[in-house]
Amino acid sequence: MRSLLLRFLVVPLLLASGSAVASAQSRREIERAIGAVKPALVRILVAGVEYQQGREEKSESAGSGVIVRPEGYVVTNHHVAGWAKRLVVTLADRTEVEADLVGTDPLTDISVLKLRPRPQGPYPFARWGDSSKLRVGDPVLAMGSPLALTQSVTQGIVSNTAMVMPDLLGRVDLSLDGEDVGSMVLWLGHDARIQPGNSGGPLVNLAGEVVGINELEYGLSGAIPSNLARKVADRLIADGRVVRADLGLRVQPLLKSLGREKGALVSRVVKGSPAAQAGLLPGDILLSIGGTETNVRFPEQVPPFNGFVASLPVGQTAEVAFERGGKVQRAKIAPVERESRLVRPLAIKRIGLVVQDLTRSEAQALGRQTPEGAKVQSVRPGGVAGSLKPQLREGDIVVAVGNQPVRNSKELREILEATVQPEKMPLVLALTFERGSEQIVSVAKVERLDGQDTSLEARKAYLGVSTQVLVPELAAVLGVEGRKGFRVTAVASGSPAEKAGLKVGDLILAVDDQPLEASRPEDAEELTETIRQYDIGAEVELKIWRQGPQTVKATLGSSPTSPRELRRHRDEDFEFTVRDLTVQDRDGKRLGGVQGVLVEDVASGGWAALGKLSAGDVILSVNGQAVADIDGFRQAMADQKARKSKFVVLRVLRGTDEMFIEMEADWSASQ
Amino acid sequence: MRTIITAAALGWALSSYAWAQDAATSEAGRQLAKKVADAIVTVRVATKMTMTFEGESSNQERKSESQGLVVDAKGSTIVPLSNLDPSALFAAIGGEGMSMKTDITDVKLVRSDGTEIDAKIVLRDKDLDLALLVPTKQPAASLAFVNLAEAGSAEALDPVFVFSRLGRVANRALYHRVTFIGSVIERPRKRYVVEMGQLSSEVGSPVFDRTGKLLGLITLRAATGGAADAGDATGRNSVLPMVVPSADLLKFVSSAAAAPAK
């Protein structure tokens, strides 16, 4: 025990004794390493898509990346950029450049983007390092944009060069779009702190080389080793995809009860696969493939085995050796191309349904002969698909519309778009789908597509004052002890109250000789409710107190138009909605006579949101063209669309601030 | 001994009287239910909600069912607005910096026999928590309805009948309940409070007095201004189910005719 204690005490001291020299040296090394990579470090703003509730929705996220070639190829994570519709990359010098997705690989969580060419010429890029040379204890730097902050660096050491998800805490998978990343990647564990937003950023050694791509934080930080990331990135740059071999078998570490140290235990053989054709069975001990020994004793050896299988030449026959019942057997095996599990959903907007194709392996797992059909991903509750009876559920496989068979998602969309047309309504829609072993016909009577909510608000008599209850304490302060009623706190512009001459600070004590009884906060609605008993247009006499008793007459108006009844305009290109201003908006925001339109909602991930337009802003002008109301705004936006303006600049009021919002336009998708 | 016998006899007589009154009440309730059952319908809506938080918005859709009361032969139906449109209450109880906008994109009246009638909302009243629905096409036959002009009345502790339409799981059967007026609120406007049932949400249920006349419809009352106490964790100062009297219902429905068409 004593020696243990001594060791814990001595080691820090020893480190401290040489620390001045060491820290100066390591600081120079760190600065050199940062200097080598930082110019190539980027922050990536992603406008992506998500599919839920039967529709495609845009989303916004941010991640990190590193430029690895002077042409502007950026490596990042698949989970950062794999679903991007638009990519805006901030370089180290803070300039923004648009980028395009070159290719993505969910199995290793690597994506490659290409920055659009720039007039200044080639981009600065970082060099790859050899991740196999890393040792536990080596210093490393995690570079990126944690929490979407500007480019930042944290420091740590390599903690583990072969990190797998632990079985101890139950089965933990890192699955992305149907792919188990841990089946292919042995992470570099390190203790340089990373946060959301660091994803895709480089892990850098002190030589200023990229030795990993940061991906996850699970107690330790985890990076995809550069040797794997580089191989995948090279394939994506060359071909846009990664071709891998597949034998149709799965292995697991050898069981202790087998009492052996070499080989790999075959746990599953897919029906009809190359492994099945070669005669392999679960329980066999795989000894070699193409003369290369296969040893899987520990979980850490599974990803390298899978990597080795994936690298086999597709279609080229190899010899496989395996042991069954103590006898070694040999057979020929011809790897096939591994099927990608990444299937992009398809939104069928007209009926509010998102479907996706089935993969071969998925169909097999479901016990189907064929992957034909369209698998339901989600249903819009208020859409046509949501009215089908019985209801469609996630995982159902649509196989026919009426009598027309459906082979895939695209075909389903074509059939539905031809069938469900406004001019054909009312119509009966019948979809046949499979759910487990059942084949069910679901039917809906379709009378219209989306209904419009055009309901009106009930009109009530209206005075147009905001008030506070004249509680006894307030009455005492105001010197009107014992009186009950309301104190006027605001008078709406143009309201009957304003016309009657009511002012802030007046006390309203009675309406038409009916004394008001309000004296507790609970009585807050007495005046409003009293006024609402009258007809619109009625004349009322208000007993008020303004430095003494007075009487004012007011002709009650109609309650103002509510915001939901106002004219509004949805801009589908930039994805936001505006409406006319109400009297309440003007009073509440102290707008006075300002002309403009109010931003009611801004869709997350839309171009307006990317430009930082915010719900509640009041738009005063569009590219210098003043807008007074909805008609003016609609016209101004139509003008920009006709001109295909690259930038649309809005002058807005946000609270008391006035500012310019710059929205970049993408008219290519415009209807 | 004689005293005990007299007391026992009196007790028996009283309990018999009470039993007789209960039996009569039950029978009256059953007869009333037969008369009004078809006017109590299920209302199914699809609602598109836009939530805005810190300047950005996201959409969500949901389908929900409520109950409504048919108030004329053409199928005009009243229903608590908060059952259809959560934004009606959101302003009263919603969080700081958040707002909600809703559009009701599909409305169906589901009758007890399962037939569906396409409908639309024509009028809303946030104060009364009421919405008026009308069929998009005139129904082929007249619908059963409750006449709002035949208004009932009640005092505190009077027995009343509450009828609700149960959900699909109970085959949309009618749920009957006898309860008492727990409170009569006079200010700022007359409302009744009845004890709420346990089996189903009774917001949207009609309440009838002991003579079988409509006392009103249960809706949610949300306090505003100083009456809403943000510091009250139980919410008892913010929202409470209350019976909107028939007279207010009639005035609301009548005002739809006066409202400009949109």
Image: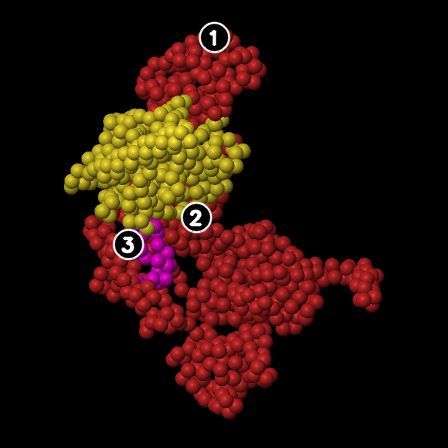
Chain colours: A red, B yellow
Amino acid marked by disc 2: Gly
Q: Residue at x 27, y 34 (%)?
A: B24
Residue A513: % across, % down: 39, 11
Is A540 located above or below residue A636 in the figure? above
Q: Which tag, 1 or 3, sits closer to the chain's start?
A: 3
Residue B236: % across, % down: 47, 33
Any part of residue B8 in sight: yes
Is A460 located above or below residue A239 in the figure? above
CA gap, disc 1 and disc 2: 57 Å
**Quick one: B225 or A404, which is closer to the camera?**
B225
The answer to whether marks 2 and 3 sit on the same chain is yes
**Tag 3 subunit:** A
CA gap, disc 2 and disc 3: 31 Å
Badge 3 density bin: few <14, some 14–19, many ≥20, Cα 10 Å: many
The magenta-colored residue range is A375-398
Badge 1 density bin: few <14, some 14–19, many ≥20, Cα 10 Å: few
Residue A72: % across, % down: 53, 61
The answer to whether marks 1 and 3 sit on the same chain is yes
Amino acid marked by disc 1: Pro
Report which residue position mark 3 lands on.
A388
**Quick one: B62 or A421, which is closer to the camera?**
B62
Q: Residue at x 53, y 66 (%)?
A: A171
Q: Is residue A543 magenta?
A: no
Q: Which tag, 2 or 3, sits closer to the chain's start?
A: 3
Q: Which mark is residue A549?
A: 1
Q: Residue at x 50, y 60 (%)?
A: A79
Report which residue position mark 2 lands on.
A606
Q: Residue at x 48, y 51 (%)?
A: A60
